[in-house]
Image (cartoon, rainbow, N blue to C red):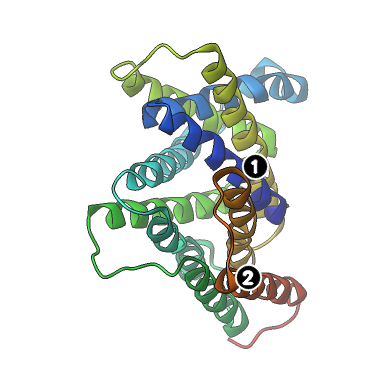
Amino acid sequence: MLIAAMALLPFLDVVAKYLGQAGVPILMIVWARMAFGVMLTLPFVLAEGGPRSLIPDRPQWHLLRAGFLIAATFLFFWSLKTMAIADALAIFFVQPLIVTALSPLVLKERVGLNRWAAVAVGFVGTLIILRPGLSAFGPGSWLALGSGISLGLYMLVTRLMKGRTTPVVTMFHTSLMGAILTTAGVIFVWQAPSLWQWVQFAMVGSIATLGHLLITRAYENAEASLLAPLAYTEIVMATVLGWWFFGDLPDGWTILGVGILIASALYISARAGTAEPA
């Protein structure tokens, strides 16, 4: 389920990039992701639990989760305004390292050498693909780093919330909290969208909602440190879409890096459920 989410979410980046190129403010794109997420999940929430399910059991957890998700989305797109996308992505992929490092402290999970090795190898594969020039760690770099850390914390909170509600209810309340938070700011940057932009907003909400439903379900069924290396597989679909939509043809180094990512993901999946050295 996490690999499926990682294959789906790069489509969100494509649509968001087109919206950004059209001059749509970043906050409006983030708001659309949250607002359409509410509308898409509401019928399923009502079908599952009726009107009572609209009241969150522990609103502080949903608020925290929504805050980390908003921060991760907003900071990443903001970083792309000041630095090359390759550099931003390379720094952003600190996220699996954050999840693995904090899992023993936050989730009390045991992280063995095999999982640490898979995360490290996956990070090397990402650097081979992106070959970033990190000599100048400027403001955009800090934004990308903040985005990766925020998404890592979002993943940890998702794991902490496992079993409290169903994934669709969790996604509804996270989107609702996010929509409330972003609405407070989007009124100051609002621009009347065209009909096609409204369609793109709906696409952003649909892709993001389905992707994060898969993430929520995945983290309910597996340890965060086990899933962390699989996040690197997102770069595979991102490479394909970058070539398809923007003409960024992969070279030999990219193919090598993708191969390393796939090997890392397959290795950690094959080790699932087996004993690991501490």
For image coordinates 46% across by 66% down, the residue present is 102
Q: Is residue 58 visible?
A: no
From this view, report whether residue 85 is shown above or below residue 187: below
Residue 113 percent location from the top left of the image: 57, 84
Which amino acid, mark 1?
A: Gly
Q: Nearer the viewer, residue 14 or 48?
A: 14
Q: Nearer the viewer, residue 125 or 42?
A: 125
Element class at badge 2: helix
Residue on which disc 2 sits? 255
Q: Quadrant of the C terminus?
A: bottom right
For image coordinates 40% across by 46% down, the residue present is 76
Mark-to-mark CA distance, 2 and 1? 25 Å
Q: Which mark is residue 13?
A: none
Residue 68 relative to residue 268: left or right: left
Q: Disc 2 vs disc 1: which is toward the camera?
A: 2
For image coordinates 26% across by 70% down, the residue present is 135
Residue 23 percent location from the top left of the image: 37, 26
Asked whether the residues under the numbered discs 2 and 1 touch, taking CB atoms below 8 Å apart as contact, a structural biologist would say: no
From this view, report whether residue 215 is shown above or below residue 192: below
Crowd around label 2: few <14 · some 14–19 · many ≥20 (10 Å):
some
Q: Please count the marks in the image.
A: 2
Q: Which circle's residue, 2 or 1, is located before the other in the chain?
A: 1
Residue 40 percent location from the top left of the image: 66, 23
Q: Is residue 227 visible?
A: yes
Residue on which disc 1 sits? 211
Residue 26 relative to residue 255: left or right: left
Which amino acid, mark 2?
A: Ile
Element class at badge 1: helix
Q: Residue furthest bottom?
A: 277
Crowd around label 1: few <14 · some 14–19 · many ≥20 (10 Å):
many
For image coordinates 72% across by 51% down, the residue present is 4
